[in-house]
Image: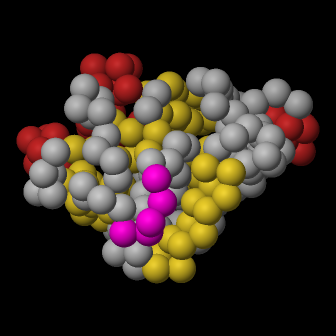
Amino acid sequence: MSDSVYYIHFKSKTMNPCFLTDNAYREATSTWLCRGCVRPKHDTQRIDAHIQDREPEGPLNLVSGCGLPLAQKSFLFAFGQERIERDLYLGQVFGPDGSRLDDWVTFRGKQRLIVRGTKNVSHRVCADCGRDVYFAMGTRYLYPAPPSDVELFESDLFGLIVLESVVSELEIPRHARVVRERLRVLKEPKDGLPPLSF
């Protein structure tokens, strides 16, 4: 794949993440949450979240302390219901009183990508689940090339990665609370690491 292939990374600008209720967090640590890297376990698909917040700040947010992204349905479904159903697992979101927040969903990518960088790179392998835990700053990019038969990916930064041509075709509206980051696919990584899995 050439260096001219680009993806768009959508991620939240929020400084106000959500948190699971105490009961939900206890249940997560005994079921789907890896204690070593504090992210959902590899084989976890749909996750329902019971959060302490009455209404997340949107249209993208995250559940802090467990690596779970949240999205407003109106934003997420702008990418097309067929793509959503094919490429993502969706869960329900419940508020502190147990009522469902109908405008919100959790999402997990059936395929997940690590957004790589060029500076201050750190990497370790989670001793509990074997996931690559990665951090980097500087210019962000993707390596290796994502699977060509997938259009929506979950990023390790709690966002959504979409092929640029799909974003252009759909004319996804811009939101003040969402960062759009253009990611190039590189033939060789700039951080000296092999392919990584999230």
x then y, percent, for residue 41:
69, 34
Lateral position of residue 37 relative to residue 47, left or right: right
Give me the residue at 81% from left, 35% from top: 28
Which of 198 and 105 lies nearest the eye of the viewer?
198
Q: Is residue 126 above or below residue 80?
A: below
Q: Which residues are magenta?
A: 190-194
Give me the residue at 30% from left, 33% from top: 147
Residue 98 in sight here: no
Lateral position of residue 8 relative to residue 115, left or right: left
x then y, percent, for residue 190:
36, 69
Question: Is residue 191 covered in magenta?
Answer: yes
Q: Is residue 78 above or below residue 53?
A: above
Residue 4's image quarter? bottom left
x then y, percent, for residue 108:
52, 34
Residue 166's image quarter? top left
Give me the residue at 79% from left, 46% from top: 127
Lateral position of residue 36 relative to residue 107, left or right: right
Which of 174 and 182 lies nearest the eye of the viewer?
182
Give me the residue at 23% from left, 32% from top: 148
Q: Is residue 177 above or below residue 78?
A: below
Image quadrant where one finds the N terminus: top left
